[in-house]
Image (cartoon, coloured by chain):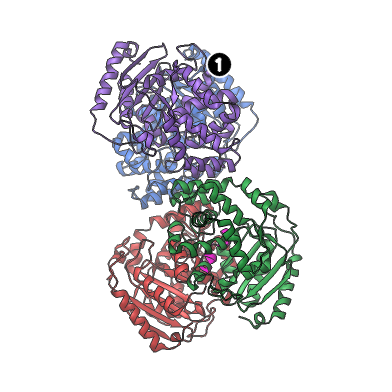
Chain colours: A green, B purple, C blue, D red
Amino acid sequence: MEGILKQPQNLAKLLQSLVDEASKLPVEGDVANYIPALAAVNPDQQGLAVATIDGQVVSAGDATVPFSIQSVSKIFGLVMAMNRVGDQLWKRVHMEPSGQPFNSIVQLEWEHGIPRNPFINAGAIVVSDILATHYSACKTALVSFVRQLAGCETIYPDHEVYLSEKLHGNRNAALAYLMKSFNNIEAEVQDVLDYYFHQCSLSMTCEQLAVSLSFLANRGVHPHSGQSICTRRDAHRINAILSTSGMYDQSGEFAFTVGLPAKSGVGGSIIAVVPNYGVIVAWSPRLNSFGNSCRAMHMITHLAERLGLSVY
Amino acid sequence: MEGILKQPQNLAKLLQSLVDEASKLPVEGDVANYIPALAAVNPDQQGLAVATIDGQVVSAGDATVPFSIQSVSKIFGLVMAMNRVGDQLWKRVHMEPSGQPFNSIVQLEWEHGIPRNPFINAGAIVVSDILATHYSACKTALVSFVRQLAGCETIYPDHEVYLSEKLHGNRNAALAYLMKSFNNIEAEVQDVLDYYFHQCSLSMTCEQLAVSLSFLANRGVHPHSGQSICTRRDAHRINAILSTSGMYDQSGEFAFTVGLPAKSGVGGSIIAVVPNYGVIVAWSPRLNSFGNSCRAMHMITHLAERLGLSVY
Amino acid sequence: MEGILKQPQNLAKLLQSLVDEASKLPVEGDVANYIPALAAVNPDQQGLAVATIDGQVVSAGDATVPFSIQSVSKIFGLVMAMNRVGDQLWKRVHMEPSGQPFNSIVQLEWEHGIPRNPFINAGAIVVSDILATHYSACKTALVSFVRQLAGCETIYPDHEVYLSEKLHGNRNAALAYLMKSFNNIEAEVQDVLDYYFHQCSLSMTCEQLAVSLSFLANRGVHPHSGQSICTRRDAHRINAILSTSGMYDQSGEFAFTVGLPAKSGVGGSIIAVVPNYGVIVAWSPRLNSFGNSCRAMHMITHLAERLGLSVY
Amino acid sequence: MEGILKQPQNLAKLLQSLVDEASKLPVEGDVANYIPALAAVNPDQQGLAVATIDGQVVSAGDATVPFSIQSVSKIFGLVMAMNRVGDQLWKRVHMEPSGQPFNSIVQLEWEHGIPRNPFINAGAIVVSDILATHYSACKTALVSFVRQLAGCETIYPDHEVYLSEKLHGNRNAALAYLMKSFNNIEAEVQDVLDYYFHQCSLSMTCEQLAVSLSFLANRGVHPHSGQSICTRRDAHRINAILSTSGMYDQSGEFAFTVGLPAKSGVGGSIIAVVPNYGVIVAWSPRLNSFGNSCRAMHMITHLAERLGLSVY
């Protein structure tokens, strides 16, 4: 790993240059528009932040603008569920890549209601079910957990996004009822989905997200607090699943070109874990056909390339 | 067609001999047990009834014992919806065989929420949606329609079956929400399913069912009342769909061995239409692996064979 | 059934009017173009012929122009195989509709190499394997059989079509090798395909085809020779499979609108069986998106409608 | 990474202890038996070898016994094809995990003949087609390449295995013909398969395999010769695809528990790349239900765990 990463000033310049570069790219892709609350975002924003395991936070562009973290929130839910039920979790959700761009419902059916991994919707709904059945107030527990990780008491779900998701959640309801028909959902479907949409609707900034996930680069220990957020083994495991399944049906290509565990959300963010160094978060709302942010992809790809970050 | 069919006494003898034969067959298959209310039926019953287009009703065995008609009720719902919305119906549900024994949800996904035909669950749920949106009181309308067809005011849904279906309806809920995500369900899913389970839970006898469906053998005209229940064309069309899709994944085999438009229900009944002659209803609760009654299949197969009823 | 069918002169007029009507339809669809030999046909032709069970042949338009019968030939192969191996055949190919417009290879895989029915390519390849293993000279046997049925010694396979099919037969080779991997092909794949493409390449006229298949409307007995071509039961069975599976993924719609057992070929022909009356053959080269001739469909639909021919 | 890895003597002891441990495990799984030549292997063997980027080779157990490397050979073919045609390769084969345990033919069909990645059979057949069309003598070229990498002139394909594979290659023929129907195979299918089976039948030892693949841990440079075998970027990329797709449908689980790029073969070997350190090869013939060696899995898992080798 290059020396530049150890020098905040040089890193700041590099991040700024990548944001500048991204802002000049031809307009490509579209903002997520399946719900009005997401479609309303200003598409011409781009932020980039790095939180290192020695506690530094360096950023550029719109890195302090809150956005809807959407599927990135699946990581928070997963950590909570792993901590709560341990390896039992893996009886109800697998850790294999899905390989089903078009259609996770087919796979659910074939595999008797056991989702392929916790980062596809079906898998995150099972995780939500675990939280809904093991916490008396799972929504509150999630928000507390995320605030603690980010070191910031002002993180909230976006209520408009939450309501919007609920209104357009028929496909997720179909997944949940199908899994319930295979006895892989314990709580009431409506309660599980209510929590799930709440989780998706969290609003955070690049900097907050980078800090809150930096324990994944640090063997489970939060660099700011020194607290163990998960075991070293579970940090490895989460990074492993992120590597094979974090970027929808572009996961293989992302491993191929970037080589880092990563997760994207349709709000336009991508988080990438650099083991033993830190976490990168890039954000820009316009998405490619896989649902990954075009410019966040650009920024992270070039950052990883210039600094030789690939774990492979 | 053999002369025997014109002579009620000879026909009665033949039906009785078929019931006797069926009752002596080795025990095979199991009563539907996905809900307790169906599992409780006495499995050692068999009834057989024929209602002819000249108004006669001939029967044998337990032909006056009420049973849960289940999927046979899809015919009643379909006729009501065809009468109400005409050919618009066929934009929302197709008329092709499904060829998917194992998994109608896969096909729904592939075909963007348009079910293959009105006799698979997904298709019947779309029909239910049409009834739920076009009738102010669709449950009442159904019961009135069926009572009028059967000429009997004492036909009711079985409340216990209805509640049981609702409790175990997660898979149907998954189908409905998936179709709603493709905008092919207009009403609230819970309302549509509520009607659908009500329809499935109707309780009727072999004789009642034969009389109530005899218009299908008579170009849409009810032989008892002379009333036109549907157009001649629609009677042909319903018989056509019954021929290709009425017997689950045994439809092709049924056409091959029996050669009559037919519909079965997991309550153990099979109805078969003999165009220009009448309707046969056989009932016995134990089902084969396709969900069709073993003994009802036996009785209808032999009746059709002995009398040369195949339409082909 | 209307009296007109009994009077050759009136029938001739009706056929002529249907051909005239078809010839004035707006141009729609395209000639099969997956092989050059088929693409070269003059698309502006239409023929219509009826062969009745009392031995008459009435026709109009280009009913004496030979065309490539393609998939209609699957009927001849099936009859030969049924006669040769009896009910053993049905262990190696089923009789259910396929319901897989896009992709019979998926179903083959799911169902362990057993094709859904003898009228999809995979099924006809199994039938071809049976003929290749049971006849020392299966190509010659087929041609003799068809000439005998048509009462015409000048029927030949079209050598150019045959060679063209072989050159473009990779998908059929994939189906055959897949079935061989499931042990459902006994002979060498190349030999089986060689016979199969030979069968597809038979060239016949509307009149010849109608006469040669008229035994299907006559309980297996050829009306001209009085010879039994297949058992009465097998005639019923073939008609049954034609009804559920003869028109590709438009089989359900054809049953719905026409109501007759039928088979189409990508050469542009459709044959329809009217039990106890005769066989209709319509031909015109341009195909709709399902691979069925637009104008042949039009002619048969209107003929069936005007004369009330639906078996349902 | 632990100091032990730098000290050959300590490493030798560790490898020996792991082999001893493996040899005492309860017998589990079965030797590959789809061809007689593979079924004949003595199942009670286990070998373990490590080749480091500083040129050392340490091993234990049956590490100098040759075995059929089978799918591990896909790496050699891939490197040759990448070197020959560059990024054009990725238009004909993707780099996404397949997620289709049961059935790669379904995915090929859905994705129009483009295989998901070069480590499933279909993908390796496309790679073979590239070699068959770009080398005048591709079999010889492969053997030379592998001998050069292993630094050993006595590596040969096992002729009996090769013939056996050819005889039982119907499923691979089906894949190849299907891809040819989508124009993704250029050469004659039989020639492509001939090369492919030749590649699979290479016979090598644990030590030879470890040495020959050590360039993957060393940014493309062979540690023994100092020669560049592939670009640094391509070494990263191959490791990335190995990480997401190298272990059949257990790839996600392997990433989760071991965290190393790896490839297995049904001959019972598993190779794992430790970037910037070296390559591990474990071998023992009995396979689990995924087709991965039970004991090789055990040895590699424990080696990686004890030494903290996970890249995540």
Residue D230 horizontal/vertical position (percent): 54, 76
Disc 1 crowd rating (10 Å Cα; few below 14, some 14-19, many 20+) is some
Q: Chain of mark 1?
A: C
Residue carrying label 1? C13
Residue D145 horizontal/vertical position (percent): 46, 76
- Left or right for C71, reference C61: left
Give residue B81's quadrant in the image.
Answer: top right
Q: Is residue A73 magenta?
A: no
The stretch of residues the image draws in magenta is A239-250
Residue in the image at 30% along x and 15% along y: B12
Residue A44 horizontal/vertical position (percent): 76, 60
Residue in the image at 68% along x and 69% along y: A207
Is D253 above or below relative to A198?
A: below
Q: Is residue A243 magenta?
A: yes
Give residue B50's quadrant in the image.
Answer: top left
Q: Which secondary structure, mark 1?
A: helix
- Left or right for A308, reference B119: right
The amino acid pointed to by label 1 is Lys
Viewer can see residue D68: no
Residue D135 horizontal/vertical position (percent): 50, 69
In the image, D26 versus C282, the foreground residue is D26
In the image, C240 versus C218, the foreground residue is C240
Number of numbered discs overlaid on the protein picture = 1
Magenta segment, prevailing SS (helix, strand or loop):
helix
